[in-house]
Amino acid sequence: MIHATKNFLESTLGSFPFLLMVHSIAFAIKLIIFIFLIRHKSNTSTARKSTYLLLLVLLGAHLEDFSWIAKLIYHLFFEGASYQPILFISRIAWAFTIVQYQAFSLFIECLITKPFKLSIRHKIFLTISSIFIVYFLGTAIFHFRNFEVKDRSWLEFALLRVAALYMLIPLMLSCMYSLVRKLKRERIPRILRKQLNLFLKAVMAPYLISDFVQTCPYNLTSSWITYWATNSYAFISISTILLTYAIFYCARKMMGLRFLNMSKHVKSPIESSFINNFKDVFEQLNNAMSLNEIIHITQSRFKDAFRLSTRSISLYLRPFDTRSAQECHTTEFIEIEKKVESVIDSKETELSTYIKKSKILIYDELDFNNFYEEKQKTTAVLQFLDSINADIFLPIFNQQKIIGYIIIDQNARPTQFYSNVERNEMIVLASYLSTILNLIRNRNLETIISKEKEMHEELYRKHQEINQYKESIRSFLRHSKQREIGILFYKNRQFSFENKAAKELIGVNPNVQEGDTLVKRMRHLARDVESYKSAQSCIAHDIHGNKLVLQAIPNVEQHTIIMLVYYPEVSDILTRQMEMLKDPSEWDYLLYLETTSSGRLINKLIPGSGEKILEFKLSLLKAALLSKATLLQMPQEDLKPTVELLHHIRLRTTLHILNLQAPEHAMEVAIKLFGINPIFGIKTKEEPILKKLDGSGTLFIQNIHFLSLETQAYLAELIRFGFYRIFKTEQRVTCDVNIMCSTNQDLNTLVNDGTFSKELFAELRQTQLIMPSLITLPEEELSELASGYSEQTLKQQAFKNFLELTDHEHRRLANNRPSSLQELKTKVQQLLINKSKKNQIYDETLFDPAYEVSDPELIEAARLGKQALKDPAIMAMLWNKFKNQNKIAAFLGVNRSSVNRRCREYNLT
């Protein structure tokens, strides 16, 4: 088995072609390193000496590899040629092997000795090495022709053995002893210690072991291993491969560790984690509102990015006034602050100038620089860093003045160095911190964040207005025949169609269906023209609910009235209500009110057009197009319909109503809204309301005056800046929530009494909706509202004409005025129900099921009735609203089994 293994290794790894390839690769790698050292040699004298010695080591290694290459080429291709050149090269290689080891020992000691001078021991070894070198060089030159074994001197073979033992034992052992002693006794930079540790373990130890095994194998236990180690080409191949890889690995690592001071900083590959997460840091810093929060974010970022403990990172902010100094500094930092201030705030010295010119001070790199080229200012900086126990001192500059600094404690990362990439990352973060700190110190940050939120709100308003404008324009282009004008004649109480367009626009026979609402408006308009002998016009609706303009012109000669019918244009919509506008510049909102879906919803909620009602509806539309917090002041019954309307127009999906019935107790509302610092041990089952509503929700706080002053302050901060603080912490969370509030108190009086937050009132008063009181509303406007609700109550046109409110009923409503719109709606509905029962035509199907519903989405579902079961989207909306199949069935007026079947079909659970 042993013999077979030996034969296999010799036939593969020990073959001449394989061995030639191995030594060629080793020669090439060492040549690359040799050229690199020549091109990047340091300018410092200590490093230059070490570089020259290392070049001699590589030169000896090159000649050794070249000797092997020449020998292998000879055996492969020139077996019959003279062996004299090969032996000559080998003898030269033997001489330079001595050079290699001697340079090796001097290089190691030169690397850690400052300044390096030859001792007696060095001179003795140099003398002995020189004797060996001279002998082998002389043998190569003067015994060139003696290449046969029988012609070669016995002394040559003896000295080869002695030289091998000399290099490995007295020369290298004495070198290693001296190295260990100096490492224990002398202070050596950490970077250099790391280099030596890597060099000894990765290169020197394997190299010496390999040579020792080949030179002194007699103590090995197995005779075949002894023979294989001393005579096997396979062993040489394996050892050469391992040593070559060790040299390549060591070279890469040590070059990154500023080997021989060839680079200014420790190097490492760029990692994407810092870059990928930097945007999150910027966002956190942008949202920071206090210096303590800046300190917390900085410590957290350094901990994650540079693998440090939070306790080893400190951010010191230089005091610029008494208040900020007390805010930023604690007693444990006083000593370090005094030492730093005594340096950077003193008269201009070489040390203070050096610190102010440097972007960052890294102890290990400065220590390494000072080892190779000691300078007074570098020594002073190292002493300064020692005095404050710092591995890193990172100044934060603003306009060439230090406004703060970051200190990382010594040995915070004992096994790793700070690389050039990490250095640049720290500098970038310090630069950005400078801007944020400057804004906070100048009290501009809050203003900037507030202005930024105002800009976002203004952009949202403009976007909404553009959408309203587009929808308004589309409404005029909706009908393909909208530019056609219908012409009718009215004579002797009879209508006659003059063209086809009139018949299509009217849609009914006006001489037969006299009870139709449109026909009644036409006859009323014709009687006005007959009475006043002048042109009259009005707005009516066709059988589909679309607006029509009716314009009547008298023809005195023929005793006929000419009536024009057409879809309205912008001027027709605006002309009739412009005179009621207090501010004529708001004509665009009037247009949106009459032509867009948002406007139709508002007109549905408030079906009146008097001066006060119109003013309120325009205010409601403007508030709906904003994303600002809104304060509602109206009767309690009208709050929910108004909130649902605003919530729907603002395109929000989740509505949360917080109804406060008594003053806040134990900050319970604040905890529900904002969450609580875990340190207080208060466990809540649900996440904060604001977190759940973020991005898609509306929060309505009823009776906001019941909130505590502290909760009001938190809420004011959210409204103003667009983020909230977790209760009892400085941690801020960005939040996009529509906020609506209501109160039945005079907030201005509460502010003066000190029971309501001045800041919150200042935010809420920017968008207030104050509904005009129905008690003081003009009788005409109240009657118009009642008529509008009467129209909404009934589903069938015929019964609308029969059950419409009489003048007597309008007077009864005016004499016993309701206090809210919802109360008015209820009274109108009750009047119609009583009238229908009195005339024995009462039927629930006559009345619109969506009449008492205020949510725009539920209104559509209520009108569809059982047909809503066929629409998955509507059923999903109903499930999200009610979360109960029985409630859905009751709302739609269908069996629960039908709802259950559809819920299973649509996977609604």
Image (cartoon, helix red, strand yellow):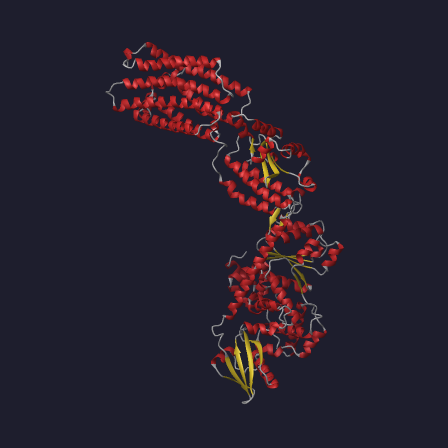
> Residue 877, position in %: x, y?
55, 60
> Residue 133, position in %: x, y?
38, 15
On-image quarter of the N terminus: top left
Q: Is residue 906 left or right of 741 when viewed as pictured?
A: left
The answer to whether 696 is drawn above or below residue 495 in the figure is above
Q: Nearer the viewer, residue 629 or 821?
A: 629
Q: Nearer the viewer, residue 139 or 300?
A: 139
Q: Is residue 351 left or right of 201 when viewed as pictured?
A: right
> Residue 865, position in %: x, y?
55, 67
The answer to whether 485 is drawn above or below residue 300 in the figure is below
- Name the residue furthest front: 348
- Name the residue furthest right: 753
The answer to whether 71 is drawn above or below residue 478 in the figure is above
Number of marks in the rendered image: 0
Q: Is residue 112 left or right of 67 when viewed as pictured?
A: right
Residue 746 occupies which quadrant of the picture?
bottom right
- Name the residue furthest top: 154
Whether residue 728 is visible, yes or no, is: yes
Whether residue 901 is visible, yes or no, is: no
> Residue 312, position in %: x, y?
60, 34
Q: Is residue 63 left or right of 339 when viewed as pictured?
A: left
On-image quarter of the C terminus: bottom right
Residue drawn at 62 percent across, 62 percent down: 623
Residue drawn at 72 percent across, 58 percent down: 747
Q: Nearer the viewer, residue 615 or 377?
A: 377
